[in-house]
Image (tube, grey):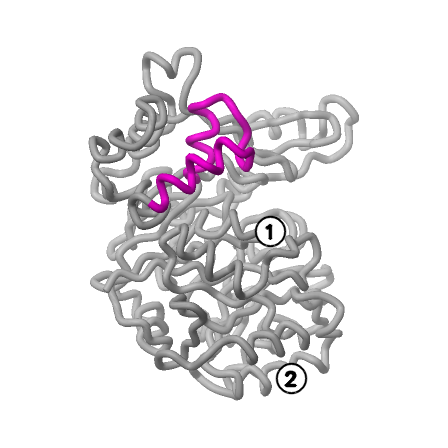
Amino acid sequence: MRIIADLHLHSKHSRATSKDMDVENLARWCKLKGINLVGTGDFTHPIWLRELRSKLQPAAPGLYAYDGIHFMLTVEVSNIYPQDGRLRKIHNIILAPSFELVDRINAVLGRFGSLMADGRPTLTLPSDKMVEYLVELSPDILIIPAHAWTPWFSLFGSNSGFDSLEECFRDQTKHIYAIETGLSSDPPMNWRLSQLDRVVLVSNSDAHSPAKLGREANVFDAELDYFELARILKEKDRSRFLFTVEFFPEEGKYHYDGHRNCQQRLSPKETKALNGLCPVCQRPLTVGVMHRVEQLADREEGFVPEKAIPYRNLIPLEEIIAEAVGAQPGTAGVREEYLKLCRAFGGEFPVLMDVPLEEIARVTSPRIVEGIRRMREGKVRILPGYDGVYGEIHLFGEKEEEEGGTHPAQPAQMTLF
C-alpha cells in the first residue's frame, strides 16, 4: 500500500504551536491531506503522553491509531551542550515503537532537562551520548537529525552546528541512518556532500498547526509496520521508499543569507563580497542554507548519487488557490475551495500529485487548474527566504504569466511527474 508519512510535528504543548494540535484535529487534517501515518510529536511531555495513551489504540506492529489514522510515537528534542570549545545546539527526532519504550526513553532524558517545560525539551545531553543511551535501551529506536541545515539548532547549522555527521555523533554515527532535509533544503542540495551518501534523506512538515501538516512528507510502498519502515530507512530500500515530498527549498525561511531587521536578502556570492556584514547596519548577516551548503560541498551542483531516493517539489494547495483567486491562505473563500477539492478527490496529496487536470477542471476554476499544472511542472517564481522570513512563491504574474516561471527543473532521472 502507499503510505504518506509525516513524522515530525509538534503538539499543543510546544511553544508557538496552535491549540488545535491535538489528537482529534491531527486525525481530521490527515484525512483532508491524504496522510495515513503521522507522528505524535512531543512524547516526552507528561500531559501530552497521558492524552496519547488515553486516545490511541494499538493498530499495527509498533504503531497506534485514532479514527482510522495511524500514529507513530515521535518527539523532537533540543540538545544544547559544549563541544570542542563551542556551544552546540542541535535538534534531533526520536522514533519509538511502544509506550513502554517511551517511558524508558523519558526516564533517561529526564535526567538532562525538564520534560514538562516544553513539548520539545531542552537537554544538556550531547548528541552522541544520547544515541548511545537510547540504542542501549533498544536498537528499534531511531534518531534522526532534524532540519539538518537551518542556521540555528541543526546538525550543519552555521551558527551552532557541526561540519560532519562524525563530528557530531562520533562513534555513534553508525546508528544514524537518516537525516531530515528541512524546509530550506532539498535532496539535490544534500547530494553535494559525499559524506551523506550512506544515509537516507527524509522530509517532514515540522508542523505547528494542523493546516501545515504534509508540507513535506515521505512516500512508501509498504505495510503499516514500524519495524518494516525502520528497515526501509536503515537499508535505504529504494523499492519501498518511493520519494520525498519537498517544499521548493527557496520558500524555506533560511534559504539565502540576510538580515531581517534591515530587509536584506542576499545570495552567498553577495554575502562574500560584503565580508559577511549587512550593508545597512554593518552587523553580521545570518548565513543561510545555500551558503552553508557551498562551504561543505565536495561536489558540483547537479550531482546525483547512485541509489538516491527520488523527490517531488510541491506547493501547498491552499497557497495555489490563494494566489489563483487573489486572496490569502486560510481566508474563508480559499478554505472553502480547498475543502471542496480535498473532499472531491480524497485529499490534498491526490489533487497535487495524481488526479488528472481535466478531472480537477470539472470542479474548480481554470486558473486554479493552471496553478496546479505550473506547480507540477516546476514553473514557479520564488523570492528566497532569509533570516527567518519565508520565501515568497508565485505561480502567476509578470513574465511568468507568459513564460511559466524560473525554477530549475529536477534532474531528469529524478523527475516523477
Residue 415 lies left or right of residue 10; in this view the side is left
Whether the magenta-drawn stretch holds residue 219 is answered as no
Residue at position x 65%, y 61% from top? Answer: 12
- The residue shown at (55%, 33%) is 331
Where on the picture, by quarter, is residue 107?
Answer: bottom right
Residue closest to the eye, 289 or 393? 393
User: Is 140 above or below relative to 250?
Assistant: below
| In the foreground, 405 or 55 | 55
In the picture, the disc for residue 120 is none
- The disc, 2 or 1, on the residue closer to the chain's N-terminal end is 2
Residue 296: x %, y % from top left: 50, 47
Vertical comparison of 138 with 216: above or below: below
Residue 50 seen in this snapshot? yes
Q: Does the magenta stretch include residue 328?
A: yes
Q: In which quarter of the image is the N terminus?
A: bottom left
Mark 1: which secondary structure? Answer: loop
Q: Is residue 341 left or right of residue 204?
A: left
Circle 1 is placed at which residue position? 157
**Percent coordinates x, y for residue 413 in the rendering:** 21, 43
- What segment is highlighted magenta in the picture? 316-343
Disc 2 from disc 1: Cα separation: 26 Å
- Type of the residue with mark 2: Val
Q: Residue 108 carries which label?
A: 2
Vertical arrangement, residue 208 with respect to residue 319, above or below: below
